[in-house]
């Protein structure tokens, strides 16, 4: 059951600066209707004690953004603003508040910064006219971790279907908007098989996907002793219900870390690259005119 809660934010942008380029994330909503079972934001490192079972709306985010951006754009001429790093910017609340649309329009019309959007929602198509106007400054990454609808329903119960997301990728690229796929996160022993990548990449290629990039599932325990289940515990509940035979494998793979063993990552990296090459998919993520690689900037520590 989702309902509105209006909250006041003290900060709009979470900023990092690399070689005089600004990289910033902005999220007009806290919490997400998709309720993805693997979501890294469930960790208290990011959401503290916040209840993410319903969506909160930052009612003053545009006013704060205006003040912050006026300071940054004088000092930093180029950069990327990310939407959707902690909460889908095009979930259903956007139909009512239009905050994501207004933020993107403001950035594109009043700064020289590029915009990168992460979403699982076909609602992003409502802003197609804006995207077409600034097509050289927009990248959209549609999140897809599998081509298996049963797996999708287990881990992403309230998100758009795989078919809808593939159609979204196709339409955006046909309209001249650079759109690729964020294969994030890879779920060990569930979505990391050659069969899954073959099926997914085949469908991505068929629908005109420009690029892929990927990241691995994190499993974090709570840092503080709070009355909130950890991200790891929430994910393990799903394993217990649907994949109980994998729990020992996870314990071994994530031994003493919130990331899977680096040896495992290297094996999967190689597998992904080989299959991406087979389907002629760029596997370096999106590109900008001045950009090299800024994949490491995706998951900036979140401040609400």
Image: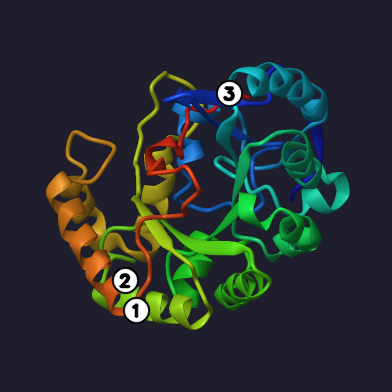
- Mark earlier in primary sequence (3, 2): 3
**Residue at the disc numbered 2:** 276
Image coordinates for residue 296, horizontal then vertical, percent: 38, 38
Comes first in the chain, label 1 or label 3: 3
In the structure shown, which secondary structural element does the residue marked by tag 2 occupy?
A: helix
Q: Is residue 224 above or below residue 122?
A: above
Question: Do residues under tags 1 and 3 come within 8 Å of each other at their CB atoms?
Answer: no
Residue at screen point 34% across, 58% down: 187
Residue at 44% over, 45% down: 234
Q: Nearer the viewer, mark 3 or mark 2?
A: 3
Which residue corresponds to the image point at 27% horizontal and 41% vertical from the top-left? 259
Looking at the image, is 29 positioned above or below residue 142? Answer: above
Foreground: 103 or 177?
177
Which labelled disc corresponds to residue 76? 3
Element type where label 3 sits in the image: loop
Residue occupying the far right of the picture: 96
Q: Are marks 2 and 1 in contact (CB under 8 Å)?
A: yes
At horizontal 40% and vertical 49% (from top left) the residue drawn is: 235
Q: CA distance from mark 2 to mark 1?
A: 5 Å
Residue extending farthest to the left is 263
Pointer 3 and pointer 2: residues touching (CB < 8 Å)? no
- Mark 3 residue crowding within 10 angstroms, few (<14) / some (14–19) / many (20+): some
Image location of residue 22, percent across then percent down: 53, 28
Separation of residues labelled 3 and 2 (CA atoms): 35 Å
Q: Which residue is mark 1?
A: 279
């Amino acid at each position: 059951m989702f309902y509105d809660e209006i909250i006041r934010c003290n900060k709009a942008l979470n900023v990092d600066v690399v070689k005089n380029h600004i990289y910033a994330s902005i999220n007009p909503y806290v919490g997400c209707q998709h309720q993805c079972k693997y979501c890294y934001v469930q960790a208290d490192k990011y959401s503290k004690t916040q209840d993410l079972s319903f969506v909160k709306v930052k009612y003053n985010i545009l006013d704060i953004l205006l003040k912050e951006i006026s300071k940054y754009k004088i000092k930093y001429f180029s950069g990327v603003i990310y939407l959707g790093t902690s909460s889908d910017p095009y979930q259903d609340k956007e139909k009512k508040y239009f905050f994501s649309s207004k933020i993107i329009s403001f950035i594109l019309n009043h700064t020289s910064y590029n915009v990168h959007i992460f979403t699982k929602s076909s609602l992003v198509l409502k802003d197609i006219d804006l995207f077409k106007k600034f097509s050289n400054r927009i990248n959209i990454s549609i999140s897809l971790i599998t081509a298996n609808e049963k797996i999708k329903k287990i881990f992403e119960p309230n998100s758009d279907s795989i078919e809808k997301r593939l159609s979204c990728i196709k339409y955006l690229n046909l309209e001249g908007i650079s759109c690729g796929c964020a294969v994030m996160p890879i779920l060990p022993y569930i979505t990391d098989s050659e069969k899954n990548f073959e099926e997914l990449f085949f469908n991505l290629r068929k629908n005109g996907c420009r690029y892929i990039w990927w990241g691995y599932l994190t499993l974090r325990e709570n840092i503080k002793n709070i009355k909130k289940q950890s991200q790891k515990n929430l994910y393990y509940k799903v394993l217990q219900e649907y994949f109980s035979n994998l729990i020992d494998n996870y314990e071994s793979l994530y031994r003493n870390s919130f990331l899977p063993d680096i040896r495992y990552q290297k094996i999967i990296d190689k597998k992904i690259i080989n299959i991406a090459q087979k389907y002629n998919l760029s596997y370096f993520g999106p590109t900008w005119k001045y950009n090299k690689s800024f994949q490491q900037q995706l998951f900036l520590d979140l401040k609400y």
